[in-house]
């Protein structure tokens, strides 16, 4: 099945994007406005109230350091949380129409990433305008990294959305779990300020690689590959493959449990 | 013989018990271990059927007999617990009006989604959009959110997209019952031309009239099992007879009578007049007299319905005894006679049929039909088929 030429998939993607903005007065302008407003809030909170300082971020300032990691994380976390609900939420459709139901979580993840990509772009441009040195060739190289993050989110969401059909508690467990994951990922801080033992543990968090890689590419123009750059793509593919297998293993029985 | 489009072999379907969380967990654990759930409610039991290309096939049965579940298995919405299903055609299924319609979105958006679900590419949809809009005939409402639609409009739009998807096999559940008279007619015309083009229909309906009109073969499901399968008239008649006897049983009125227990039937239906080659021949303006004798197994007086149709089946006039408050003449314990005279009926020359029907005493269900052909002789240059009293002023 070729996802990109599947018209059901694109219909679902356009549907989930429009559901969020359909009834708004300004419509799609919020795609850009909302991230910029959030950026302003973080700038205020972390430079005026907290005066946060991180040794790694001294060169670029805390706000860009946070912003580069924060939007990909938001896209990931929102995609997982929304995507996990899709199978249960579309029970009526699954019970009446035969179609590959994995398109439901996949399209939700894709839609969420597309929406946040627009905001990410806007944030990068504003950072550049306010005098931060954005490495645009690094931004180009960040695109496959974001693609891998999307693949990782797809695999994870395929697993959770199928599991939620059978174990409804997933809907309650996931939000705190994602918050825990947020704080164990070096988004608000850097691994270098942690105690040695803790930092060693958190290195195993795949999200650490994503945020660090994005920062090094976009903020520091560090394109030097490392061995983890080889392992992570393989991990993402494995997660996606396992998620899809799990989903398909049980998708024939969804209707019985919905 | 044409190729089989649907082959169902020994299909059973269990719904696991999943109301309580621990039941869900147990069923899930069983699934994860690779076992099919076997302890739930059995909705289908060992159902086999084969539908070949060009056939039209009706599925009938009581509420809860498993008809909709069978359709879901056929369309691949659910997988059977046992047995195998093979469907080898471009299928369009209409299981519920507006399935896949999202109320917040406009009719147009929903058409796009539905078309995608039916396997149409965006280009095909563009080509067929005019047809869809014309068929659905809902005007400017197409740009309104579907939540503002009436149920009739939803089913019109749903059917229009299905019709446009050019299926080889159409599977419908009881959906046509919703539209208004003219839309139902449009749908039935479409289905008839669809069948004439060599396509295949599989439908579920409670309307024996529709099933007999559209289907050649039928399957009667009872408690998830195949009760009878075969020619549509055989199956529908035994289904109706079964219903009658069940009703009679419930009322405690069942008596053992002749073969077709519990069914009001026509013993004889005759017209007064000379007949040749099976046609009763009358002159223009002659009275038409008919006599209908009905058999009532439970002894209650049935309702008689007598009417005239043109040779092509267009009804001219019909009237039932309960409309007019007429009681039949009792000839015996189980026999009732109805006589009617249409005085100078004003029918123009041509071929007609008189029809006599037996209905249950409530006048709700049509149980039996008999027909006599009538030829009205004479010469006339008037148009139409009935002369209306008139004066030129």
Image: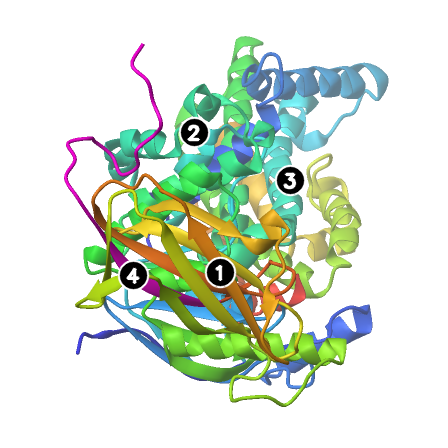
**Mark 1 vs mark 3: in front:** 1
Which residue, given by chain and number where applicable, does mark 2 sit on?
Answer: B108
Q: What secondary structure is marked by label 2?
A: helix
Give above or below for A9 relative to A125.
Answer: below
* Gap in angstroms between the C-alphas marked 1 and 2: 57 Å
**Mark 1 vs mark 2: in front:** 1
- First reached walking from the N terminus: tag 1 or tag 4: 4
Q: Is residue B115 visible?
A: no
The number of numbered discs placed on residues in the rendered structure image is 4
- Binning the other alpha carbons within 10 Å of mark 1 as few (below 14), some (14 to 19) or many (20 upward) gives some
At a point 40% along the width and 79% down the height, the residue shown is: B234
> In the depicted view, which residue is nearer to us: B325 or B87?
B325
**Mark 2 vs mark 4: in front:** 4
Which residue, given by chain and number where applicable, does mark 1 sit on?
Answer: B339
Q: Please state, as top left, top right, bottom left or bottom right, where the N terminus of chain B lies in the image.
A: bottom left
The quadrant where residue B161 appears: top left
What chain does badge 3 belong to?
A
Magenta stretch bounds: B368-393
Q: What secondary structure is marked by label 1?
A: strand
Label 2 and label 4 in one chain: yes
What chain does badge 1 belong to?
B
Where is residue B220? Give x, y as percent: 48, 77
At a point 58% along the width and 40% down the height, the residue shown is: A212
Where is residue B173? Give x, y as percent: 48, 58
Magenta span includes B376: yes
| Left or right: residue B20 compared with residue B336 | right
**Disc number placed over residue A78 in the picture, else none:** 3
- First reached walking from the N terminus: tag 2 or tag 4: 2
Which residue, given by chain and number where applicable, does mark 4 sit on?
Answer: B273
């Amino acid at each position: 099945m070729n996802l990109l030429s599947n018209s059901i998939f694109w219909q679902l993607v356009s549907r989930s994007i429009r559901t969020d903005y359909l009834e708004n007065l300004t419509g799609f302008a919020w795609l850009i406005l909302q991230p910029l407003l959030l950026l302003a809030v973080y700038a205020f909170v972390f430079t005026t109230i907290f005066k946060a300082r991180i040794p790694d971020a001294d060169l670029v300032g805390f706000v860009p350091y946070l912003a580069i990691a924060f939007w990909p994380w938001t896209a990931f976390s929102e995609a997982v949380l929304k995507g996990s609900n899709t199978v249960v939420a579309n029970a009526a459709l699954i019970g009446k129409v035969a179609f590959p139901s994995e398109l439901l979580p996949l399209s939700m993840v894709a839609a969420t990433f597309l929406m946040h990509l627009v905001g990410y772009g806007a944030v990068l441009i504003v950072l550049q305008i306010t005098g931060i040195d954005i490495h645009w060739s690094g931004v180009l190289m960040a695109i496959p990294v974001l693609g891998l993050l999307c693949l990782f989110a797809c695999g994870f969401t395929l697993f959770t959305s199928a599991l939620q059909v059978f174990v409804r508690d997933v809907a309650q467990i996931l939000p705190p779990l994602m918050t825990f994951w947020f704080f164990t990922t070096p988004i608000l801080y850097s691994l270098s300020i942690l105690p040695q033992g803790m930092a060693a543990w958190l290195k195993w968090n795949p999200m650490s690689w994503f945020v660090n890689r994005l920062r090094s590419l976009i903020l520091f123009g560090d394109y030097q590959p490392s061995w983890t750059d080889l392992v992570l793509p393989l991990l993402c593919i494995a997660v996606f493959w396992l998620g899809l297998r799990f989903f398909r293993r049980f998708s024939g029985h969804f209707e019985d449990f919905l | 013989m044409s190729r089989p489009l649907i082959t169902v072999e020994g299909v059973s379907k269990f719904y696991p018990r999943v109301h309580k969380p621990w039941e869900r967990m147990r069923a899930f654990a069983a699934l994860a271990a690779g076992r099919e759930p076997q302890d739930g409610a059995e909705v289908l039991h060992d159902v086999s059927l084969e539908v070949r290309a060009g056939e039209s096939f009706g599925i009938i049965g009581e509420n809860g007999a498993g008809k909709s579940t069978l359709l879901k298995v056929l369309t691949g919405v659910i997988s059977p617990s046992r047995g195998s299903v093979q469907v080898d055609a471009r299928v369009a299924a209409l299981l519920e009006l507006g399935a896949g319609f999202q109320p917040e979105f406009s009719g147009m958006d929903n058409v796009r989604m539905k078309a995608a679900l039916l396997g149409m590419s965006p280009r095909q949809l563009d080509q067929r959009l005019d047809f869809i809009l014309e068929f659905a005939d809902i005007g400017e409402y197409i740009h309104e959110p579907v939540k503002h639609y009436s149920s009739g409009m939803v089913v019109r739009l749903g059917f229009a997209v299905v019709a446009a998807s050019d299926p080889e096999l159409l599977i419908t559940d009881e959906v046509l019952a919703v539209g208004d008279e003219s839309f139902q007619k449009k749908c039935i015309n479409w289905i008839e031309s669809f069948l004439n083009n060599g396509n295949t229909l599989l439908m579920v309906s409670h309307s024996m009239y529709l099933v007999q009109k559209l289907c050649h073969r039928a399957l009667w499901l009872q408690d998830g099992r195949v009760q009878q399968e075969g020619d549509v008239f055989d199956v529908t008649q035994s289904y109706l007879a079964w219903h009658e006897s069940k009703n009679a049983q419930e009322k405690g009125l069942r008596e053992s009578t002749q073969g077709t227990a519990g069914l009001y039937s026509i013993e004889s239906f005759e017209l007064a007049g000379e007949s040749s080659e099976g046609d009763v021949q009358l002159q223009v303006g002659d009275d038409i007299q008919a006599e209908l004798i009905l058999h009532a197994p439970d002894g209650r007086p049935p309702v008689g319905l007598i009417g005239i149709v043109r040779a092509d089946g267009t009804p001219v006039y019909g009237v039932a005894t309960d409309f007019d408050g007429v009681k039949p003449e009792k000839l015996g314990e189980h026999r009732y006679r109805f006589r009617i005279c249409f005085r100078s009926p004003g029918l123009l020359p041509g071929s007609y049929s008189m029809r006599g029907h037996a209905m249950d005493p409530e006048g709700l269900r049509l149980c039996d039909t008999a027909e006599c052909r009538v030829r009205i002789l004479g010469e006339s240059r008037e148009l139409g088929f009935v002369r209306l009293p008139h004066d030129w002023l």
